[in-house]
Image (cartoon, rainbow, N blue to C red):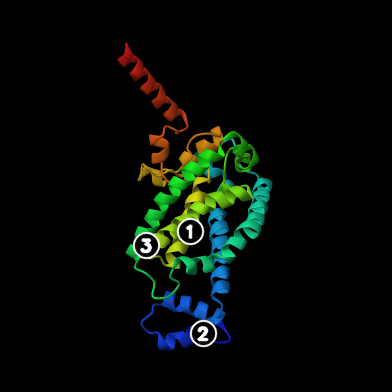
Amino acid sequence: MAQHTYWGSFEEISKYNVSLNYAEKMWLAWYTYMQNDVLATGIMSFVMHEAVYFGRSLPWIIIDAIPWFRRYKIQQQKIPTAWEQWQCALLVLFSHFTVELPQIWFFHPMCQFFGLSTTVPFPSIYKMAFHIAVFFVLEDAWHYWTHRAMHWGPLYKNIHKIHHQYSAPFGLAAEYASPIEVMVLGLGTVGAPIAWCAITGDLHILTMYLWIVFRLFQAIDAHSGYEFPWSLHHFLPFWAGAEHHDVHHERFIGNYSSSFRWWDYFLDTEAGPEAAKRRRERKLAKLKKVQ
C-alpha cells in the first residue's frame, strides 16, 4: 500500500516482499509511492539521464583544468576554456529540456505499448549483459549510417555543423548538437531496444536504463579528447573511443561509427595518418600487380 512518504512505502513493501532484494524493494516502493506509472518513469528517466550525463562530464572538466593531464590530450594545443564549457552546458541543458524531456515523458506509454517489463524481480545480470551487447551493435550500425549521411552537404550545413563547432571535442560536447540531430541519432539509442522488445517480447526497463548509462559513458568518453595507456581500445582493438572520434572532429570527415571500428574499417571510411598510409600501400600493391 502507498504511504505518505517514499520511505514509508519502502518499509511497508519490505514487510510483505521479503524475497526481493534491496534494489528491487526500492524500485517497487517508487512506483507504489508515486501511484502514477507515467510520472514515476518520466521523473526517474530524466533525473537519471541528467545525473549520468553531467556526472560523467564533470571528471573531464576537472582533467581539462589540470595541466599534468595535457600529456594525454590528443590535440594538445586546443584546451577548452571555462567559457566554452559553460556555453556548451547551457545549450545541452536547453536541448535536454526542450527536445529530450518531451520524449522521455512519453517513454512509459511507449514501453507499455511494446511490452517492456517494469515489474520486479529484475532479470538476471547475464540476460541484461546480453541485451546490452546486442544494443551496442545495433546502435553502432544506425549511428554509422545516419552520421555518415549527416556529412552530406545540405544535411551537414543545416543540421550537423553545430556539433562540429568544436574541432577538439570535450566531454560536455557529446550531446552538443542540433535538436534534429539529437532526435535522429537518439532514435538509434532508444529504437534498438524497442525494436528488440517488439520482436522478442523480452526486455525489462532496467536493462534499458543500464544500456542508456553505458551509451552515455561511451559518448562522453569518446568526446573527452584524451588518449590514455589504459584506454579501452588498447584491450579491445575493435573499440572506437576518443582516439577514433577525436580524429573525426579534427578532420571533419571519416570515422563515423560510435562504439566500434568495423564499419569504418570495412567500408574504407577511416580517417587519420595511419588510415591514409594503409590506403597508399593498397594502391601501390594494386599498381605492382597491374605492372
How many residues crowd mark 1 within 10 Å: few (<14), some (14–19), many (20+)? many
From the top left corner, tell me how far across and down residue 37 is, in percent. 53, 75
Q: Which residue is mark 3?
A: 200
**Residue drawn at 65 percent across, 44 percent down:** 81
Looking at the image, can residue 186 be seen? yes
The answer to whether 193 is drawn above or below residue 78 in the figure is below
Q: Where is 241 relative to 198, above or below? A: above
Residue at the location (47% across, 37% down)? 255
Within 10 Å of disc 3 (Cα), the crowding (few <14, some 14-19, many 20+) is: few
Disc 1, SS:
helix
Whether label 1 touches label 3, CB < 8 Å: no
Q: Position of residue 224 (x, y in %)?
A: 53, 46
Q: Which mark is residue 212?
A: 1
How many angstroms separate mark 3 from mark 2 (CA)? 33 Å
Q: Amino acid at mark 1?
A: Ile
Outermost residue on the top side: it is: 291
Q: Secondary structure at mark 3?
A: helix
Res. 148 mark:
none
Name the residue beneath numbered marker 2.
Answer: 9
